Amino acid sequence: MTAVTQAGGPPRGEVDEGLKRDVGFLGLMWASEGSIIGSGWLFGALTATVLAGPAVIFSWIIASAIVILLALIHAELGGIFHVSGGTSRFPHYAFGSLAGASFGWFSYLQAATVAPVEVLATVQYFSTVSWASGWFQVDPATGAGTLHGVGLVVAVVLLVVFAAINLAGIKWLSRSNTWVTSLKVFVPILAIVVLVTTHFHAGNFTALGGFFLKGANVPMTIMKAIPAGGIVFSLLGFEQAVQLGGESSNPRRDIPRAVIGATLIGALIYILVQFAFIGALAPATLAHSSTWATLGTNNSALAASPYATLATIAGLGWLAVILRIDAVISPGGTGLIYNTTTSRLSFGLSKNGFVPEIFEATSKKNRVPVFGIIIAAVVGALFLLPFPAWSALIGLVTSASVLMYTGAPLALGALRYSKPQLHRPYLLPIAAVLCPLAFVCASEIVYWAGWQTYSTLMVAVAIGYILMLISAAFKLNPKEPKIDWIAGVWIFPYLIGMGVISFFGQFGTGGIIGGVGPFKNFMVGGTGYIPGDVGIPFWWDLAVVAVFSLVIYYTAMRFRLSEAQVDVYASHLYPPEGEVTAAAALY
């Protein structure tokens, strides 16, 4: 069906959510690409190499395959439902209000934490310049660093700037982001070409004991680097085209193509960035490290600004300057678009009745969710306090992101059963196999992040449930839905079960709230009991996660909403009667 534009409204067959449909294909794809190419390319190569050595190339390939699979699933869902904050609303259509509230909060938590990560990256990179040396201080003994004084002020100011730009309107943001993202893609490609052709040392891949970390559990290091090394974090962002679905000018055609295209481009760039980084390290730099694990701790400048320091050592001062400029542009562009996304997710949560109705309020001129944009900046600033460094926050962001992504394969699997006749511009092949596989893979990443990260995430999840209960208790949204306990009966067993497996697993010793402060000795997990202490082989803990995930997946399929219930929850997507039928719009 060809959408027909109505005077003063959206195309026929498209729901008007009170937002302007001004974003075209390039705007959608570059929104996703601009989120993928952020601070991850500036820091991810070093952080991941320290954990897994040159074998980290396998980590990038594995993570890219998983993220591409999740992107394909989002492509089908985004082509069906063209709504703002899509990742928070797909589970709502498939499993009802409890799932919608849960995955909506997971999505919001993920998006809200990305902007502070990006501003941290900018401040951290500039701390290697003399006039900004006091902004971020690195402990040479551990390689850990924290924001200081003016650095914290600069980070907060950047978050305020993101909010101000978003308040200017989505059309202006989309146009500016297209140019910014084009530059963000160009700079890493330039760095790859220059370093590989002028300062590449093939011997680096077998230095410091060999391709694999000497004396390490190689499979474990490869998998641990996926969440803890910032690899998954770096690849995230493909869903931005889906989140802006309510503002797309041609969502059926553009959303699937934008999601798939951005993911493939991003994955290729990151794998090449990692390859170039290892090869371009100066042999003298490696000579000062006894192992790959000490690479960052023995060079504080490398830890603070990996690629810029690498270029400086190589005598490429002009490239170091470009990289420091890009340290503002790349993270800044990503933080900007995630401030947009965070406000759209709270908009979607309000549309579904889970948070106060004020989050739906839009400005008269630009029709952007004003309150949601302001709150997104405030929440981002709050995350700067307990997580004052890039590496400290990426684990939480990664886990929240992947927990959010688990909702997509569940929703698609359920909708294939409940609504097989829906019109799908992009149809995922063999979905009966790929949906449960994607859910298992996402669960494995959550497990690999470790108990320390998972327990901290669960505290944040609990806070979300409390906030939504307060909204319901004080009747802050008249659209508050009836809770679908039966359709969402699997959610709490999944969260608790993953916690139990993580607690007795081998990844991430520590405790709740990152194992710091008054909680330092509380609920210390990551015991390694499942794979090691009783003589069980390493891979068995991964099998436990896989089997448990499949049980949850097929339980969710069993309790999914019926076709009639899906129609009730998706009724606001259907055009007014007499203009075009629901069948023509969605089927």
Image (tube, rainbow, N blue to C red):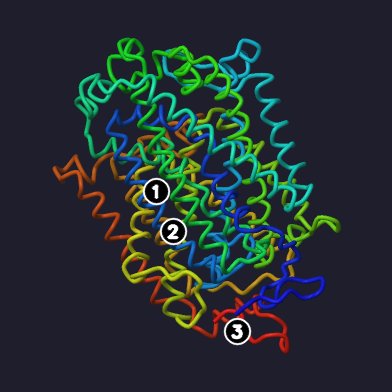
Identify residue for label 2.
Answer: 406
Looking at the picture, how far across and down is residue 546, in whole percent? Answer: 28, 57
- Disc 3 residue type (three-letter): Ala
In the rendered image of this protein, does residue 131 appear above or below residue 357?
above
Q: Earlier in the sequence, mark 3 or mark 1?
A: 1
Looking at the picture, how far across and down is residue 571, in whole percent? Answer: 64, 79
Q: CA distance from mark 3 to mark 2?
A: 30 Å
Image quadrant in which the N terminus is located: bottom right
Q: Earlier in the sequence, mark 1 or mark 2?
A: 2
Q: Residues within 10 Å of mark 2 (few under 14, many from 20)?
A: many
Which disc is residue 446 wearing?
1
Give the quadrant of residue 48.
Answer: top left
Query: Residue most toward the front?
Result: 197
Q: Residues within 10 Å of mark 1 (few under 14, many from 20)?
A: many
Q: Look at discs 3 and 2 and give the one toward the viewer.
A: 3
Give the quadrant of residue 535.
Answer: top left
User: With 70 as the anchor, is 533 left or right in this view?
Assistant: left
- Disc 2 residue type (three-letter): Thr
Q: Find out whether the residues at labels 1 and 2 contact each other: C-beta distance under 8 Å.
A: yes
Image quadrant in which the C terminus is located: bottom right
User: Callout 3: helix, strand or loop?
Assistant: helix
In the rendered image of this protein, does residue 270 appear above or below residue 124?
below
Q: Residues within 10 Å of mark 3 (few under 14, many from 20)?
A: some
User: Callout 1: helix, strand or loop?
Assistant: helix
Q: Earlier in the sequence, mark 3 or mark 2?
A: 2
Identify residue for label 3.
Answer: 584
> For this rendering, which residue is in front, 256 or 89?
256
